[in-house]
Amino acid sequence: MTKRGSFHSLQIKFIIVLLLALAVGLACGATVKIVGDYSIDHIYLDEEASNERCRKALNHFSQFVQEKQLHVDNAREIVRWAKNQNHIYLMVEDKSGKVLVDSGWWDEATYYSAFAGEGDGISDAAQSDEIPAASLEKSADNPEVATQDDSMEESFGYGMGSAPVEFADGTYLVSIYDFSEEPLYEIVTIATYAVSIAIFVFVMLWYHQSTIQQIIKLSREVEKIAGGNLEGHITVRNRDEIGVLAQHVDSMRYSIMREMRAEQEAWNANSDLITRMSHDIRTPLTVLLGFLELLDEGDFSQEETYRSYLGICKKNAFQLKELADKLFQYFLVFGHRDCDLNLELTDARVLLDQLIGEHEVLLQEQGWQVENRRLESQVLVEVDPVYVKRLFDNLFSNIEKYADPGRPVSIEQKLEGDCIRVSLHNFVPHNPNPVESTNIGLKTCERIVQQLGGVFQYRKEETEFSAVLTIPVCREPQNQTN
């Protein structure tokens, strides 16, 4: 069993783990986002790396133009090449700086060509509302176009590469902008969400698996106990509902073990008593029968012999009676039925004076010092006098067997509330005589008092013994019951 601590509800723990998983997931996702963006900005978009990608794209385009023997007015082929490269923006200018072909930032069907209506048949694209043709012409008469191009250079900066390219009809300036970092940013964003969700799910699955493992472990331990292995230990790790359940199961296991031990002790006491009683009864019974036969035959010449035989018979008869009393005590303690009580409304002071007084006189005659404090007033109790006599016979028999004769025996009778409290106290010598091996006499007293509606308690120490019994009183006369 673990030490008791503060209780943590599974519901509260779940909420805490949920918030923790959310916080850890967001933190890991933010870390991925920061590291990814930083890597793209400072490694992939490095000036040298960006210019290298633009140079490669220009060389590839130059080879494409030479292989296809393209003219500058083949705008559709030029734009198709740019769109096929993915994340490439291409613009062709003449020596005066006029834009002849612009691949556009949008889909393949939307681009600009200065040759609208001339051979290429792209007048619809040139007149598109999305890209007005005039807005892309570089000239001194259109300062807005020049301003737009400047802003584009500022926006894409070192990502732009420009070089002259030999077309079939002349040399033109080709400018390429690389914006291939955009899918990388998208990948980083996706990775951010994926890592956040994965961490969140992992933490929640870990908590769920931990809880399930506790339940499985408890189930297996309970299964072993159900199979009869009561020595199996129940593990109590957490102070939650599962821990409390495990603690209760462990307490139940201890209770079952205690009951089984008590049952085994009762069985052992039963076996020992029957064995001892069968032997003890046989001896006096054999002697008694033998002398009874002699008395029946009358084969004796003197009165003294007759009296001697009669005394032996009487002695063995008393031994049989004592054994019979022990059998009664045994069945009273270990029997499953209550004894039949003949209850009578009795003055407790008179009854106790009579029962305790008899034993007090006998003890004093044997040299004992007895201190007896009697009841001061009349009190009515409803008891069976026969069983109460057996009760005090057992208590004083215990004193005669185990108490120290050189030290006083204290008896106190006192009215406390609605009960009469009788206390007996005596001292035990260092080397007491082992008269009997069981506490069946004390257990008999406890059973009798319980059936009278009272409480019996005793305490045995190395040098002292005390017993306390309480019996409820009757404030008003009651009818006698059987």
Image: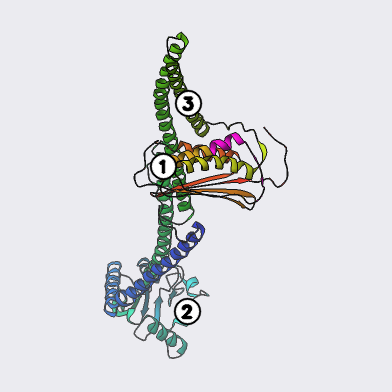
Between the residue at mark 2 and the residue at mark 1, the CA separation in whole angstroms equals 125 Å
Question: Which quadrant of the structure image shows residue 138?
Answer: bottom left
User: Could you tell me residue 174's position as x and y percent?
Assistant: 33, 78
Between the residue at mark 2 and the residue at mark 3, the CA separation in whole angstroms equals 137 Å
In the image, which is nearer the foreground, mark 2 or mark 1?
A: 1
User: Could you tell me residue 422's position as x and y percent?
Assistant: 56, 48
Q: Which mark is residue 133?
A: 2
User: Could you tell me residue 225's position as x and y percent?
Assistant: 41, 40
Q: Which circle's residue, 2 or 3, is located before the other in the chain?
A: 2
Q: Name the kind of residue labelled 3 in the image.
A: Phe
Assign a secondary structure to mark 3. helix
At x 51% / y 58%, what residue is drawn? 11
Residue marked by disc 1: 402
Q: Residues at badges 2 and 1 in contact (C-beta under 8 Å)?
A: no
> Looking at this view, is 78 or 379 the one in front?
379
> Looking at this view, is 38 or 168 the one in front?
38
Between the residue at mark 3 and the residue at mark 1, the CA separation in whole angstroms equals 22 Å
Residues rendered magenta in the picture: 376-391
Q: Which circle's residue, 3 or 1, is located before the other in the chain?
A: 3
Residue marked by disc 3: 318
142 shown above or below 160: below
Q: Which circle's residue, 2 or 1, is located before the other in the chain?
A: 2
Q: Name the kind of residue labelled 2 in the image.
A: Ala
Q: Is residue 182 left or right of residue 51?
A: right
